[in-house]
Amino acid sequence: MGRYTGPVCRQCRRAGEKLFLKGERCYTPKCAFEKRRKTPGERVPRRRRMSDWGLQLREKQKARQSYGVLERQFRRYFSDARKLPGVTGDNLLQLLERRLDNVAYRVGFADSRAQARQWVLHGHFTVNGKKVNIPSYRVRTGEVIAWKAGRLDVDFVQQVVRTVGQRPLPEWIELDKTAMTATVLRNPEAADIDAHIETRMIVEFYSR
């Protein structure tokens, strides 16, 4: 299965809530979810209670689409989370939060995770001074994420410089607005993650 290339707002309508896939646009009246909340599809959906499996699937899809992860990747993240000590659901979100593209989005280096993923692929970021173009790269404590040399003079990065710091910053990341760098202070904890995802349902989905 390839990456989804259709209208991302359709995924929000399917989930029944905003997934903030378009970044700042999702906070404005131009958001397509605000204009059209109806579930996608030509037919009027029948009013019936969704099964437990359907609720679990929807929650899994919501988490996967929020972080922009493919099904096989997401299943691998779940497998890794299950091997770690602690609560599997919390471990899953922590692993997703430690993705390089997510960190770039969290600190305000990009408007959305999709944009952050694209910029990582294009080699705009470095980790501890070395270029990393793998969006799924798992950051570790003490690592410093910065823009590649010469990128701060580019027009689209100058726009980032003017707006960085306006978004609430997770406590496990430290931002230096002057140097435009982000330092990973520690691994994220469950309390640091503001994603409204019922991880219990995801665990139940994969435990069938």
Image (spheres, rainbow, N blue to C red):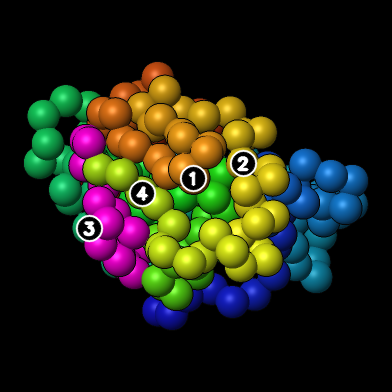
Identity, as a three-letter code, of the amino acid under mark 4:
Ile
Range shown magenta: 126-142
* Residue contact between numbered discs 1 and 3, judged by CB atoms under 8 Å: no
Residue 205 versus residue 168: which sits nearer the camera?
168
> Picture quarter containing residue 131?
bottom left
Spatial CA distance of label 4 from label 1 is 9 Å
Residue 41 versus residue 100: which sits nearer the camera?
100
**What residue do we see at 39% from left, 32% from top?**
173
Instruction: Look at the image and tell me in which quarter the N terminus lies.
Output: bottom left
In the picture of the structure, the residue carrying the numbered disc 1 is 180
Spatial CA distance of label 2 from label 3 is 32 Å
27 displayed left or right of 16: right
Spatial CA distance of label 1 from label 2 is 9 Å
* Label 4 secondary element: strand
In the picture of the structure, the residue carrying the numbered disc 2 is 164
Viewer-nearest of discs 3 and 4: 4
Viewer-nearest of discs 1 and 2: 1
* 95 drawn magenta: no
Identity, as a three-letter code, of the amino acid under mark 1:
Met
**What residue do we see at 46% from left, 28% from top?**
170
**Mark 1 surroundings within 10 Å by alpha-carbon count, few (fewer than 14), some (14 through 19), many (20 or more):** some
Identity, as a three-letter code, of the amino acid under mark 2:
Val
Identify the disc placed on residue 76: 3
Q: Earlier in the sequence, mark 1 or mark 3?
A: 3
* Residue contact between numbered discs 1 and 2, judged by CB atoms under 8 Å: yes
Residue 160 visible? The answer is: yes
